Amino acid sequence: MAVGQVRDHRDIELVLKGYRLATAEILYRMPDNLDFLQAFVWQDFDIAPDFPVLCKFLRFWEENLDGPLHSVRVASTQLMTPAEFRAVDGIIRFH
């Protein structure tokens, strides 16, 4: 699936509720050698600027995984908004 592609009807509903595709680059320390960093990329629909879905994932990480978090970098994009959907009264044809 291409980046930014809506996966199913659930995703369209989320987008219409204000969710946007968010990507986080998570750097964490290797459990057996804390001097080494490993990267993990997370991507899901979330609401900026609070990112509650990402925060829930990071809480799960801290409570259940051994690799301590080093840093998290987040990017979010706007796919579409409800304002982009309009009722059309007719058809205009260009030759």
Image: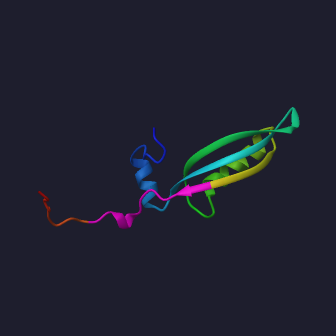
Image vertical order of residue 16 relative to residue 41, above or below: below
In this rendering, position of residue 76 left or right of residue 58: left
Residue 7: percent from left, percent from top: 43, 43
Residue 78: percent from the left, percent from the top?
Answer: 48, 59
Query: Residue reaching furthest front?
Result: 95
Q: Is residue 82 shown above or below 34?
A: below
Q: Give me the residue at 13% from left, 59% from top.
A: 93
| Total marks placed | 0
Q: Nearer the viewer, residue 66 or 93?
A: 93
Q: Which quadrant holds the N terminus? A: top left
Quarter of the image where the C terminus is located: bottom left
* Coordinates of residue 85 in the picture (x, y in percent): 32, 63
| Colour mode of the rendering | rainbow
Residue drawn at (62%, 58%) of the image: 51
Horizontal side, residue 66 vs residue 75: left or right: right
Magenta residue span: 75-86
Please state the horizontal and vertical placement of residue 72, each as a whole percent of the image.
72, 51
Relative side of 20 to 51, left or right: left
Quarter where residue 81 is shown: bottom left
Residue 76 falls inside the magenta stretch? yes
Identify the residue at horizontal 46%, vertical 61% (top origin): 17
Seen as rendered, the residue at the extreme top is 32
Q: Please tell me which residue is depicted at 76% across the width and 40% down the height of the picture.
A: 64
Q: Is residue 42 left or right of residue 84?
A: right
